[in-house]
Amino acid sequence: MITSATLETALERLDYLIEPLNETVNVPIEAALGLVSAGDVRTTTAVPPFDRSSMDGYAMRGADTLGATADNPARLRVVGAVYAGSVLGRELGPGEAVSIMTGAAMPAGADCMLPKEIVTVDSGWALIPRPARKHENYIFSGEDIKVGEVFIKPFTKLDFAHLAMLAAAGLERITVFRQPNIGVFCVGEEFSPAGGPLAEGKIYNSNGIMLNARLAELGFATSPHRILPDDPGPSARIIAGTAGALDIIISTGSVSVGDKDIMGRVFGLLGAELDVHRLAFKPGHAFMCGRHGRKPMFCLSGNPFAALATFELLVRPALARLAHRPDLTLTRAKAVLQTPFSGGKGGSSPRRFLRARLVLPTEARLPEVFLPDDHSSGRLFSLPGCNCLVDMKEGLKGLAVGDIVEIVKLGLTNQ
């Protein structure tokens, strides 16, 4: 077990704690948004499946338009019309043209088409004012993708474009990695139900809603959080009773050293392996993680921002590994501080992560970062609008306007 771990040491331990979830499921493509592909996806049909027109106009044989000019246009007999979803039904002969719509199948014998805007039709004849080049405005079968070609590789997070490609290829289902089942538990008897009056000495529970909402923002299906009592025995039994259906366990609260901070004893009652106990930075110093059987278990502070910070810095990378989601990997950048911070205490100041708002530059310069007024780990109402964490190194007395700071972005890496 590691005590008072640095962020870097705790992240290294995740490689030991987290085993990627390799179970797969086959789902309808309508249900696949945000999931991760588990194998090569190949086309069973060419896209497009036939040669087609790129616009509305007239299909013809290019050879029939040689020498055509505006003063002496080629005259082609219009022998029909082809709409999207229909075919001409015969080969186009010499001296013939056919009206054709965008995306419609090019008739056999036609090797080009000209847009409607430059063709004049007079008593069933198409007047062509210039030579048409072979394959002009002509889309070939398989031009987008050929039969048997891989168009989605394994470990691809599926977005709207991938689903469109699956549909275009005529596929109804895709095999993906199963999403992890995540359990969120809030420990404490101080919570009053939302919507009712606060009992004396009670508070409303925000951490469960916050963590479930953040998980949903990151693309994970969630279930309602559960409240655990300030009693290690019942709490351990509740976790043990639900752990069989879970892939990762996250709790918030009762993780420090007070009389009612029970999660250390819960670990023991569960027979769980405690791997990291406490962190060497703020907020979130009070922290535990380990494994209950083969399931990772993270116990976060009950203070709202401390819970969020350790979720982002440690639980999120764990989920990235568990769920084959490299887009969840945290990225760092340099930024120019625009708000001073004086919260350090000389050489004894620990490393801190400060909530902040990153503003991207409009020119070739570093982005700017702004701090809210309050940085208490229990303060929730200064959190909206924050999209990064400022990594304030150990020992600094404070930060000044104009300092170049390192920030941890909280958006997805592909955004």
Image (spheres, grey):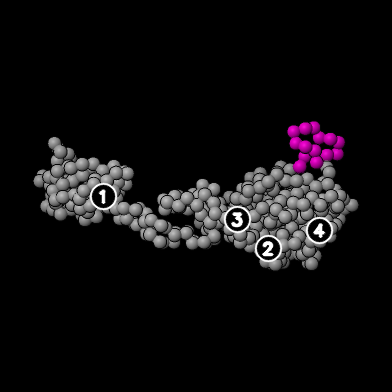
Q: Position of residue 112 (x, y in %)?
A: 23, 52
Q: Which of marks 1 and 2 is in front?
A: 1
> Which one is earlier in the sequence, the residue at label 1 or at label 4?
1
**Is residue 154 visible from the viewing direction of this image?**
yes
Instruction: Determine which residue is flagged by label 3.
Output: 178
Type of amino acid under label 2 = Ile
Are circles 1 and 4 on residues that touch, CB within 8 Å? no
Q: Can residue 344 be seen in this view?
A: no
Q: Closer to the N terminus: mark 3 or mark 4?
A: 3
Going from N to C along the chain, the mark reached first, 2 or 3, is: 2
Q: Mark 3: which amino acid?
A: Arg
Instruction: From the image, tell me which residue sits under label 1.
Output: 106
Tags 3 and 4 touching, CB below 8 Å: no
Dot label at residue 18: 2
Count of marks, rendered view: 4
Report the mark closest to the observer, 4 or 2: 4
Distance of label 2 from label 3 (alpha carbons): 16 Å
Could you tell me which quadrant the N terminus lies in?
bottom right
* Mark 1–mark 3 CB contact (< 8 Å): no
Judged from the image, the secondary structure of the residue bearing numbered disc 2 is: loop
**Can you give x and y, in whole percent of width and height, for residue 252 in the image?**
76, 51
Q: Which residue is under mark 4? A: 270
CA separation, marks 1 and 2?
Answer: 55 Å
Label 2 environment density (alpha carbons within 10 Å; few <14, some 14–19, many ≥20):
many
The stretch of residues the image draws in magenta is: 191-205
Query: Label 1 to label 4, Cα distance in Å?
Result: 69 Å
Task: Give the left or right position of residue 85, taking residue 216 as reference.
Answer: left
Identify which residue, 222 or 85, lies in the foreground: 85
Earlier residue among tags 1 and 3: 1
Amino acid under disc 1? Met
Between marks 4 and 2, how big is the CA–CA gap?
19 Å
